[in-house]
Amino acid sequence: MNTKQNGAGSPPISAERSVESALSAAAVAPPPPAVEDLAEGCVRFVERALGVRLDYRPETLPVLDHYLEQARRATSEKVEALPVVAHMAGVYFGEVIRRRHASWWRMDGEDPTYWQVEFASVYLAFSPVLFIREALTRDPSAEPARDQAEDAVSGDPAALELDDEDREAVAARLAELPPVSEDEYYAPSTRLEVIDIAVDAIRSRRLAAGDETDAVLGPGDYERGDG
């Protein structure tokens, strides 16, 4: 599972970025209690199923990948378990991202399916539970290889929310990547790579445009309209 590189054909994320991510992860604020409860529930479920304890580090996301493959078969037979697994695994995945990139949770309503992680340095938001639901409910008869550029930033509910000009830059970067297997396409570890690549592509576009590479965004910059 660990044969992929950051970008899988794009330039790897810089050592400076890795140090920056590690420092921000060390200083990250605690998550909201509801997020912590669900994420820790995922940690317990995975440890019980696989004997391995998740630790919120990107390096251990392949463990979650493996757990979801097992859970996909189980939830197809026991549909009522689907939201439980999706909520816990999705929120855990969102916490991995939040601890890696400066970001916060937007928890509109009580349904974790639509909670979002919103970024501070670039305009990017996504619903991690929707990512995991998609992984759990995908059609196993779908074509065996998918191009990450095809759907990773498309208009489907699990897509990344981006500014239009950033969407073009991200799509161009993702278009350079080779096809991946269906299992890899839906894996949280691959989704993390897509998000990392998106952040780097946005920063590169801003730099080329003569702008500061990092914006200074707050929750108000993502406020939703009434309709």
Image: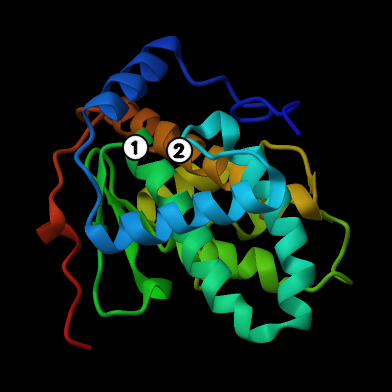
Q: Which residue is mark 2?
A: 56
Task: Indicate left or right for 114 with 145 as reference.
Answer: left
Q: Dot 1 lies on which element? A: helix
- Residue in the picture at 20% in, 74% down: 224
Residue 23 bears which disc, if any? none
Which of 80/169 is in front?
80
The residue shown at (75%, 57%) is: 69
Q: Does 122 sit left or right of 155 as displayed?
A: left
Q: Quadrant of residue 101?
A: top left
How are the residues colored? rainbow
**Amino acid tagged 1:** Arg
Q: Which residue is mark 1?
A: 99
* Mark 2 → mark 1, Cα distance in angstroms: 8 Å
- Residue 206 shown left or right of residue 216 in the figure: right
Label 2 element class? loop
Can residue 146 be seen in the rendering of this structure?
A: no
Identified at 26% across, 80% down, the residue is 109
Quadrant, the N terminus: top right
State the image coordinates of residue 157 (x, y, percent, origin top left): 50, 73
**Which of the image's four quarters has the C terminus?**
bottom left
Taking depth in this image into account, of 158 and 87 the one nearest to the observer is 87
